[in-house]
């Protein structure tokens, strides 16, 4: 039941990372602090389908 999701930078709106999550266990959307090479800084990336 793992699902592939994309993580999007809120500042430049680019999808920089992909990750997986278990839909049954983790019901809320993923938010991770990641480095955006386009903004050249760390931002809070949010899950997008």
Image (cartoon, rainbow, N blue to C red):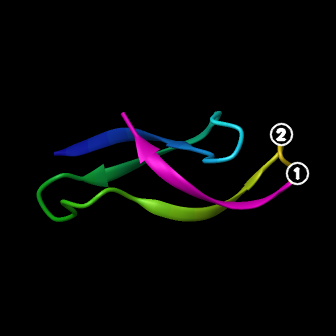
Residue 33, picture quadrant: bottom right
Mark 2 packing: few (<14 Cα in 10 Å), some, or many (20+)? Answer: few
Q: Is residue 27 above or below residue 15?
A: below
Which quadrant: the C terminus? top left
Q: Residue at x 83, y 46 (%)?
A: 39
Q: Is residue 34 above or below residue 18?
A: below
Q: Position of residue 19 (x, y in %)?
A: 46, 47
In this image, 49 relative to 1: left or right? right
Asked whether 6 or 8 is in front, the reply is: 8
Q: Position of residue 22 (x, y in %)?
A: 23, 55
Q: Is residue 46 magenta?
A: yes
Mark 1 packing: few (<14 Cα in 10 Å), some, or many (20+)? Answer: few
Which quadrant: the N terminus? top left
Q: Position of residue 32 (x, y in %)?
A: 53, 64
On the image, numbered disc 2 is attached to which residue?
38
Q: Residue at x 11, y 57 (%)?
A: 24
Q: Residue at x 83, y 40 (%)?
A: 38
Q: Residues at badges 2 and 1 in contact (C-beta under 8 Å)?
A: yes
SS class, disc 1: loop
Which residues fall within the magenta stretch? 41-49
On the image, numbered disc 1 is attached to which residue?
40
* Alpha carbons under labels 2 and 1: distance apart: 5 Å
Asked whether 18 or 46 is in front, the reply is: 46
In this image, 2 relative to 43: left or right? left
């Amino acid at each position: 039941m793992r699902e592939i999701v994309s993580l999007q930078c809120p500042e430049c709106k680019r999808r920089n990372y992909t990750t997986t999550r278990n839909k049954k266990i983790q019901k809320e959307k993923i938010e991770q602090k990641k480095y955006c090479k386009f903004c050249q800084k760390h931002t809070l990336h949010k899950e997008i389908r």
